[in-house]
Every structure is written in C-alpha cells, then in structure tokens.
Image (tube, grey):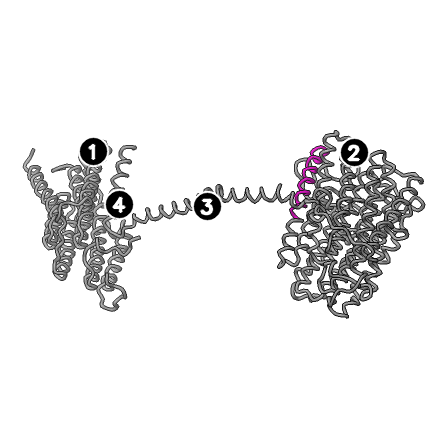
Amino acid sequence: MMGPNIVWYLCVSAFLFTTGAAGVLIRRSPLIILLSLEIMLNGANLALIAFSRYHGTGDGQIFALTVMAVAAAEVVVGLGLIVAMARRRLELDVDKLRTLRG
Amino acid sequence: MSAAAWICLLAPLGAALAITLAGQRLSRRGAGYLATASVGASFVAAVVVFVLLLGDSPNNREHPSVAWHWLTAGSYTFNLGILVDPLSTYMMLIVAGVGFLIVAYSIGYMDGDDEERRYFAYMALFVFSMLLLVQAGNLLILLAGWGMVGLSSYLLIGFWHERPEAVAAAKKAFVMNAFGDAAMALGLFLLVQQTGSLDFGVVFPAAGGLSPTVANLVALGLLGGAVAKSAQLPLQTWLPDAMEGPTPVSALIHAATMVTAGVYLIVRTNAIFEAAPTVQEVAAGLGAATLLMAGLIALVQTDIKRVIAYSTMSQIGYMFLAAGIGAYADGMFHLLTHAFFKALLFLAAGIVIHALSGEQDLRKMGGLRHKLPRTYWSFIVGGLALAGIPVFSGFFSKDPILSSALAQGWYGEILWVVGMVGCFLTGLYTFRMIFLAFWGEEKDGDLHAPEKDVPGISMGVTVAILTVLAAIAGFLQVFELWTPVSNWLDPVAPPLVVPTSTQEVVSSLVAVTLGLGGIGVAWWIYGARRAEAPEPSKLLEHKFYFDELYDAIFYRPAVLLAHGLLRFVERPLVFGSLRELTQGVRELGTGVRNLQTGLVRTYAFAIAASLAVVTLVFVVVR
Amino acid sequence: MDVGNVLVWIVWILAAFACLGSGIAVISFSNPFYSALSLIANLASLAVLYLLLSAEFVAAAQVLVYAGAVMVMFLFVIAYLGGRADTPWAGGPSWQALAAVAAAGAIFVEVIVVIGLKTGGRLTHAPTTDYFSGSPYDIGQLFLTDHLLAFEITSIVLLVAAVGGVILGSHARELPGAEG
C-alpha cells in the first residue's frame, strides 16, 4: 500500500487517545472535559479504520460509524447536563461538585 | 407393672408441665388440686407396682424397663431406663405417699400466695425428679434425677425471691450440692471407665472385681455426692439456711425425701461400698459425727424450724451410720419412720407459724397448748417418735441401728456410744422446743386470728394422718420378731451384720432410758421452770463456726480471684481487645472513606492509572 | 519511490501533525471557544487521514456529523454559557496534573510497546490486496445485511439521547435543594 503502514496510524491513534485522557484528567471545566472525551473517541475511531483497511473488510468502518453516532448521543446528553447545571446556578467546575463525597 | 411404674414417674411431670403451660388459665386452687392429684396418682401407681411385685417370688423381683437408647458413645451405651425392684418400690411409696400428703397440705398453707401456681409446678417437678432418682435403672439416670432434685430444691428454697435471705440460701444450697455432684460425677467417670457401663445390673456384680484403689475412689466420689445431698459433715451448712423456703418445702424436700437421697444412694450402691470398706466406715463415722454435732447445735436454736432442721441432720446421721455399718434395712426403715414423724413435725410447725402470722422465734411463743390443742398433741406424738420412745415409730427404727452398731467390733462400739449420746440430746432438744412453744404463759397478742387455730381441711387432715402414721408405723418391723421390711429389702441390700438378742435388749434399754432422761431434763428446765437454762456457748451458737470457715476458705478467695480477673484480665484483655477491634474497624472505615472524594477527576484518574498498571502487568507477564 | 507515494506521505505527515497539534491545543487553551475550534481542526485532519485509508463515507460522515453538527452544538452551548474560562495552568501545575500527565504518558508508551513487541512484526508487511472500498454503496450493504442489528440499535440509542436531551433541557421542575 502506499504511504505509511498501519503502525504509524496506530501511533497517531494512541497519541490522540492519551491526549484526550490527559485532558479529561487535567481540566476542570466540564465543557473541556467533554471535548477531550471527543478526542479520545476519535482516536479510537482512527485505530478502527486503520485495522479495517489492514484486514480489507468493512467491519471496522461500520463500527466507527456506530461509535460516531454514540458519541453524538453522548454529547447531547452531556451538553444538556451542563446547560441544566448552568441554569441552576451551579458552578461549572468539577472540583466544586462534591455532593457524592463519602 | 412397668406401665404402672412409668405412670408413677411421669404423672407429676405431666402436672408440672400442665401447670406451667396453662399459666393464668388455671386458677391457683386448680393448680394445687392438679399437683395433688398427680402425686396421688403416682402413689396409687406405686401401690399397684408394689402389689404386683409382691406376687413375684422374692428372688425374682428385679424388673428393668428401658424407654429408649439415650446415647451411644464408642462402646458405651446409656439407656433411659427405670428399675422396678424392692428398694425402688419402697422409695416410690415413701416419696409418692408422703409427697401426696405434703402437697395436699400446701393447698391450705400456700392459699392466698400470689405465686401459688409456680409453687405447685415446682413441687410436682420435684416429686418427678425424686421419683426419677429412686426409679433409675442406671447411675446416669440417677445422676440426672440427682441434679434435678437439686434444681427443684434451689427453686423452692428461693421461692419467695424478693427476700434476699431466701435467694442467698438457695444459692448456697445449690453450690454445695454442685460440689457433691461433681464428686459423684468423677466417681462415675472412673466407674464407667473401669466397668464399661453404668447399669446396675452390670456395675454391681462387677464391683467386687475392682481394684481397691479404684473402688475406694469411686465410693469416695459417691460418698461426696451423698454427703452434700444429705447435709452431712462437712457439707451440712446449707440445710439450716434452706429453712427460708415455705414450710411444706422444708417438710418434703429437706426432711422426708431429698435429703434422704444420700442414704438411698449408699444403700443402692452397697456393692461398691462393700468393695471399699474403708470408705464405708468413713461414711458411718461421718454420720455419727454429724448426729452429735447437729444435736448439740439444736439445743441453742431459737427458730422452731431450725430446731427441726438440725434434728433432720441428726437423724440422717443415724441413717448414714446404719448404711456405713451395713445395716441397710434398718437404715431404710428409719428413713420411712423419719419421713413420717419429721414431716409431721414440720407441718405441725407450719400450723403454729400460720397461727402466729409468721412468727417462728421460740422465745416469742408460749402457752399454745390451750390455743392449738390438736396441734399440740401432734407435736407430742412426733416428738416422742423422734426421741425413740416406745411405742412410737422412732423406737422401732432407731434402736436396731444402734444395736447393729454394737455388733460391729470396737469401731461400732464407739459409734454406739455416740449414738446413745445422740438419743439423750434428741429427747432434750425436741422437748425443749415443745415446752417452749406450748407450755408456759402466752406471750402477748401474737395470735393472728382465732379462726387460724383450727387449721383448714387440707392442713388439718394431712397432719392428722401423719400423726397416726408416726404413731403406728413402727409396727411395720419389730426388731427380729417380725421383719417384713428386712425381708423385702434383702435381695437388694442384705445386711452385713445381725445383732444378737442380748445386744438388742441392752441397746434399746439404754437408748430409751437416755431418751426419757433427755425429756426429763427438758421438762425440768423448760417445762416446769425449776431451773435456769445454762448460757449457750459461743461454739454452739455459731454452729461450730463452719460457716465462717467456709467463708474464709472458699468464698473470700473466690471473690478476690473474681475481682482480680476483672481488673487484670477482663478489662484490659477482653474489653480492651474488643474496643481495639471496633476502633480499628472504625478507623479503617474512615480511611477508606477518604477514597470517596466525590470528585470526578479523582475517579477518572484512578481509572487511567489502573489502566496503565494493568497494561504494564499484561505486557510484562505475557 | 514514485511520486504517488511521496505525495501520500506528505499529505499524511501534514494531516498527522495537524491532528496531534490540534489535540494538544484543545486541552491547553483556557478559552473554551478556542478549544472548540481546535477540535474542529482535529476532526478535519482526521477526515483526511480517513480518506488516505480509503474510508470515504466515514470521512464524509465525520465532516458532516461531527464537525458539522456536534461541534456546532458545542459552539452554541459555549456561546450560551458565556465561555467562562478556567485556568488550568495557573499557579503552576498541581501534583494532580503532573500525575495525570504521567499516567497518560505511561499509557501511551505502553501502547507503543505493545504494538512494537507483541504484534511480532505482523503489522509491518503489506495489507491484503482485496480491500474494501469504503464507498457508500459498500457501507450501506454491510449495514443492511451483516450488521443490521448494530444499525437498528444505533437508531434506538439516538432516540434515547434525543429524549434525554429534551428532558434535560425542559424548564418543568425546579428540584429542591438544587443549589450546589
């Protein structure tokens, strides 16, 4: 095949995943956390597509499309939550939301 | 016949259970009638057994009856079995007969008490336990009955449990009996190890084959149990305190039946004692010492019931003496007559106490023979029987014991002398009590109410019956002239010694003379008031300091030990470890709680870190 | 080395670096607006990579759905919320941030190691020649035959999400004790 072989794509995918993970762990605003989650999902998508290309079947692409749909659904709910929080005057800082503290 | 025996045994148990389960649904009087009827049924059944047993030839009178296999351990099996034989039937008649009279008496005596039902349930339980003891076919069931009579005694002594003295007395009785029970159990352990069984049919024939050491130890254990149960030296201090219980209880348990269980045990296991003659002699010696000591203490008692209690202790000393020298039938006959006249004395004393609304102090009594004439005459009959004056029952039963002692060589002669002194003392303290209570001037206004002078049907009739029995029961066995009792008991417990006619006559003459002498002295001092009673010595007043001795040896060290253990073991170790444990758990919980920060980021971090670690492990290991 | 290959390589390098850079940018900007825009750039570069992997339909869907719909939704919400900025790097990196970066880095390294060691060189040789074309026709065929269940379930998931979104967005109840 032309271009870099699959291992390069996998490296990019890994990097995206860990970047997203770091973002989830570091940032305090729920909005940014959601964005980082999106990055992670996309990283996974890339790995799926790469392997689909490697094996020559379409299953990976189907899976990636499903992931995309689920990610969209998740964003809907997450943003709904954030809007509800903002409407109730809760501070948008996950460090301040500690009601479940044991 | 076995059916009748089982009915005799179980009827009182049925009544006890019925009274317990019926609770308030049964009236108080009803409980009394039920208990009395059940013991009456027992007596009838016992008579049936007796009559049927008479039909058998004398050598064929052993009929064991097994209900079921109780427990099997290795090669040992123990059954729930009873034995119908002359000795057990004899005791069944006494226990059920006298028990019936006393429980009937209780209907009148305990009338009006709030807890009458509990009383009658306990009494029925006691009769059942005592019957179990005497009907037992093996030593294990006997031990079970033994323990249960101890329990019933505890329950009944402490019947009026609001009184701390009663509770203390009940505990004292139970603990001392537990001591004896332990000794007996140890003896039984040894016995079962040596002979492989506890059935009478196996153990007694095998007793002759035991080594002297083993026989001595087993007999010693049995003697320990008998001494505790019969309140002989050195375990006698519980009996006077047991007078805290209601008077019918004192009559039934601490005069007629339970305290005689020790005598029964020795007579029943005579094969073992005869294999350990030293221990048997020790038993006789203990009996003699007890009868002397108790007679002396009775001289200075001021409570009417305690005088009778010490006289019980003394008379059982006679029975132990008899069993110790091998005059088993004489001892058992004395058990019978003693049951009658001692129960009579207690129940008559109960009438006196009732009439004086609870007063038991002899110094506060006087001149009652005019107010309670019939009770007075009952006391006279009982007292004469107790002192062994012909023609009353005690004469016929006590004298053969003494004459048998005379026939036993130099040791027996010493015992005879002690027994004679006892006769003098018996006459003296008995009639001291009677003269103090019934003669002299009446002390002011103690009488409860004139209607109590005439006891009700239950109390009056039963005392009258006992009076008659105490008077004539002696004729059941007239020395060597007519010996149905000895003949009856011969297959089970043949006597070791038979006195000659000379010894009998001499012994009886001296005994009667001394008895009359005691009565005379009592009349001189207390009846006719011709002389002043001497000051009672401190030794006698403190009952030879036995209570103080036991207090110092057993009670105080135990209390000290308990306090010490509490301070040094219980608090730091047990409480401390528990407290440490709970604190540790709590701290652990608090520590774990810190993991629940409630922060999303922490949880996410935990997930990421775990992922990293797991992947690492995965990579390295695989 | 023919020109086609070189071109592919160049495109790949550009797209890959754009991807990585915008990813880092997303998590670094304090202004959420800029983060969102960086994510759009990330999605676009990913679409290019998908095209290089012959997944045309997926690339198109990525741009249309993700960058077109989802990100627009994000931007709406950011605009509604006023784009409050939080300052992750203020006061120096906290121990938590360092630990997080370390964990993420560890995962990254491990994945690389796994790929390198464990796949045993199987990934380095050329892929199979009969490759899937990735056209809408082929995707559609797969969706409606082999993976029909996934297709249907996805629709249900989307329905549920829609319902949830409506509920979350409704004004209906003020829950007691909502102040936080």
For the question of whether residue C141 can be seen, the reply is no
Residue B205 disc label: none
Question: Disc 3 residue type?
Answer: Phe
Q: Provide the residue designation for mark 1.
A: C116
Q: Which tag, 4 or 2, sits closer to the chain's start? A: 2
Label 3 to label 2, Cα distance in Å? 53 Å
* 10 Å crowding of disc 2: few (<14), some (14-19), many (20+): some
Q: Provide the residue designation for mark 4.
A: B606
Residue B277 disc label: 2
Label 4 to label 1, Cα distance in Å? 26 Å
Q: Does the magenta-highlighted stretch encompass residue B181? A: yes
Q: What residue is shown at x 92% (from left), y 38% (from top)?
A: B500
Question: Disc 2 residue type?
Answer: Pro
Q: Which chain does the numbered disc 4 sit on?
A: B
Q: Are marks 4 and 1 in contact (CB under 8 Å)?
A: no
Q: Secondary structure at mark 3?
A: helix
Same chain check for tags 2 and 1: no
Spot the residue most to the front: B531
Find residue B116 and report its horizontal and vertical position in percent: 69, 63
Label 1 to label 3, Cα distance in Å? 61 Å
Label 3 to label 4, Cα distance in Å? 40 Å
Q: Secondary structure at mark 1?
A: helix
| Foreground of the two, A88 or A2 | A88
Asked where in the image residue C129 lies, by quadrant, the reply is top left
Instruction: Using the image, determine if residue B34 lies above or below residue B297.
Output: below
